[in-house]
Amino acid sequence: MKVKGEVYLPGDKSISHRAVILSSISTGTTEIEDFLFCEDCLSTINAFQEMGIKIELSEKKKKVVVYGKGLKGLSKPNKPLYLGNSGTSMRLLSGLLSGQSFSARLEGDASLSKRPMARITVPLRLMGAQIKGRKKEEEEYPPLVISRRKGNKPLQGIEYRIPVASAQVKSALLLAGLYARGKTEITEIAKTRDHTERMLKLFKANLSVKGLKCLIYPSILSSPKRIKIPGDISSAAFFLVAALLLPNSSLVIKNVGLNPTRTGIIDALKKMGAEIRVKKREEKGEGEPMGEIKVETSRLKGIEIKGKIIPRLIDEIPILMVAACFAKGETRIKDIGELRIKEVDRIHSLCYNLKKMGAEIEEKEEEVIITGTKRLKGAALDSFKDHRTAMALTIAGLKAEGKTVIKDKECIKVSFPDFEERLKRIIE
Ligand code: S3P
C-alpha cells in the first residue's frame, strides 16, 4: 500500500472560525471561499445566526456569505448558544460577547463542558466583564453566562500577560479589546497561531504586533469583501505522515496554509529526516501565506522536541507520536501539558492506543518518550470521541500489520468530515 497523487485539503479550521466572527461584526458583505464545513465551524455560524446575522451557506461551492452588521449589530440570542465540541467557538465568543450590551449563555457537549475556562474568565473580568462559569475547585467550566454590565458600562482595556500559550485566550482578549475603552495590551509567553491578528489587520482594525506583544484599540471593522481560506495544515499532517511511512509514496498537497506559527510539524518532521519540500506562493493580500508541500517516503530518526516549537505544532502531536513509533531510536516530546486539556487528554488517548498496537511509549505528566520500532500490530482501538486521536490512529492502522478497528470514528466530522474518503482517493 502506498500514497500517491495530489490533494487539495479543506479549509483551515482556525481561520474559518475567525472569518465568520470578524465578518459578522464588520460593515459590509464578506464572501468566504474554501470555508471548512465541519461541525466546529458550523457551531460558530449557528451562534451568529442566533444573534441575528444573515449567513448564506453553499457547501457544494465551499462558500459562505456573511452580511455583517458592524461592531454593535449583534442581537440577544433567544436561547443558549450551543457550541458542541468547539473550544475555539466558546473561548473566542466569550471575549466578543463580554463587550455586548446583552446577556448570553454558552453551552457545549460533554467534552467541552470539561474544558477549563478560568484562563479566559479571569482576564475578561479584569476588563469589567460579567462572566461566570461553573466553579469546581480553582477552575471554571462551561456553561458560561455572560451578563449585561450594570449601566452598560464599557469594558476597560488592560495590560495582561497570558500565563499559558493559547491562541484562543489571546483571541478572546483581542475581540474584547475591540469593545474596550483605551488600549488592550496582551503579552504571550510563547508565540501562538496569529490568525486573529492577521485577520484583524485585513479588516482594518487598529492593532499592532511586536514579537510577543499585541496592542489593540477600539476599532470599526471594514470587510475585505472576499476571504480565501487556505487548506488546513493540521489536516495535511495526517496525509504527510501517511506518505512518509508507507513505502514508495509520493504526495503533493496543494494550497495549504503555511503560516509560520503553524508549520512546526514540517520543521519537526524534517529534523527527523523527512523528505519534505515546501514551495511558498507569492502572497496576494490574503493575509495568510499558502503554498504547496511535496513529500516522499522517508527513513525517520528519533529527536527531542520541546519549548517554543510546541505551540507551533500543538494539534499535530498525536500524528507526530505515530511517526515517532516508526523512527529509529528515541523521540522525546516535552512541554506538552496542554495536550491533557484538549477535546480529550491526548497524551493518554495516544499512549493507551499505541501501546495496544505494541508501541514502546513512556507516558509522563507533560512528556512522552517513544522508542521506535519497525512494526505495530493492528488492534481494537478507542478514539475517546476525539477527532485528532481518531485520524492519527487511522494512519497508524494503515501502517500496522493486521486489522485495526477504531471505536467512535464519527467524531472525525468535528474537523474533517471527508477525511476517510480523501484518504482512500490517494491510496494505491
Ligand atoms: C486554536 C488554538 C489552539 C488549538 C486549537 C485551535 C485556535 O488551542 O489547539 O485546536 O483556533 O485558536 P489553545 O488556544 O487552547 O492552545
Image: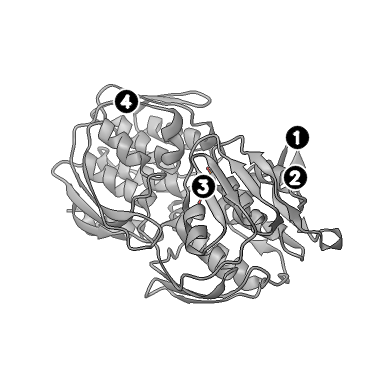
Amino acid on which disc 1 is placed: Glu
Q: Nearer the viewer, residue 246 or 225?
A: 225
Q: What element carries label 4?
A: loop
- The answer to whether the residue labelled 1 contacts the one labelled 2, judged by CB atoms less than 8 Å apart, is no
Which residue is the extreme one toward the right?
A: 151
Residue designated by label 4: 303
Please name the residue that numbered disc 2 is placed on.
Answer: 126
Which residue, given by chain and number where applicable, does mark 1 sit on? Answer: 137
**Cα–Cα span, label 2 and label 3:** 22 Å
Q: Is residue 318 left or right of residue 56?
A: left
Q: Which residue is drawn at 32% across and 25% down?
A: 303
Kind of element beneath mark 3: strand
Q: Three-letter amino acid code at disc 2?
A: Leu
- Which amino acid lies under the numbered mark 4 shown in the image of this protein? Ile
Nearer the camera: disc 2 or disc 3: 3
Residue at disc 2, secondary structure: helix
The amino acid type found where label 3 is placed reads: Val
Cα–Cα gap, marks 2 and 4:
42 Å
- Above or below: residue 28 compared with residue 37: below
In this rendering, which labeled residue sits more in front, label 4 or label 3? 3
Q: In the rendering, which numbered label is found on residue 30?
A: none
